[in-house]
Amino acid sequence: MKRDDPSRTAGLNPTIPKTETEERFLNQTQRNRSLGRVSVHQASRFATKPRKSNAGRKPIDVVLMFKLLLLQKLYNISDEQLEYQVNDRLSFMQFLGLSLADAVPDATSVWLFRQQIRSAGLVEALFEKFETYLLSSWLSS
């Protein structure tokens, strides 16, 4: 079965309704620019591999990739559906800091990033740090 095969995402609703809590989460997290500090230190340990050549696509920002994982976890969607939703929804693009002209990471990039942080043992640590960040920012506001 090909990756672009529509039967892989059959049954998934392409228009996911947003609740008020989810909208508040996206808006508040987007406004607070310190989100990048949550994951950059740990995630950059594995993401900064020396490049053999300057040819090819430039590496995708680890904070952007972490934000993609947050959206995926919040909305419980597949990699393919995440790619589609980011291209479709302005609120997702705003949360990620992307403009309409920016390229959206594809489903394979999301999968590879998840595999990298999983193999580095960083999944739990990153989400725990993010949870701490959320609690401290919401308690202080």
Image: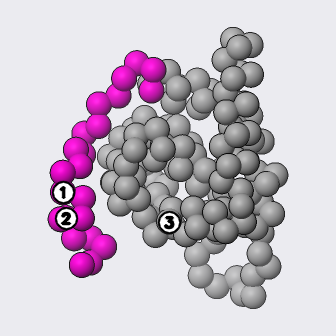
Q: Is residue 21 magenta?
A: yes
46 shown above or below 81 = below
Q: Which residue is mark 2?
A: 6
The residue at 70%/40% (across/down) is 128
Q: Which residue is mark 3?
A: 111
The residue at 66%/62% (across/down) is 117
Cβ–Cβ under 8 Å for marks 2 and 1: yes
112 shown above or below 83 = below
The residue at 29%/31% (across/down) is 17
Looking at the rendering, the stretch of residues picked out in magenta corresponds to 1-22
Marks 3 and 2, the one that precedes in the sequence:
2
How packed mark 2 is, by other alpha carbons closer than 10 Å (few <14, some 14-19, many 20 or more), is few
Q: Main secondary structure of the magenta part?
A: loop
Q: Quadrant of the C terminus?
A: top right
Residue 31 location (% of width, % of height): 62, 27
The residue at 72%/87% (across/down) is 53
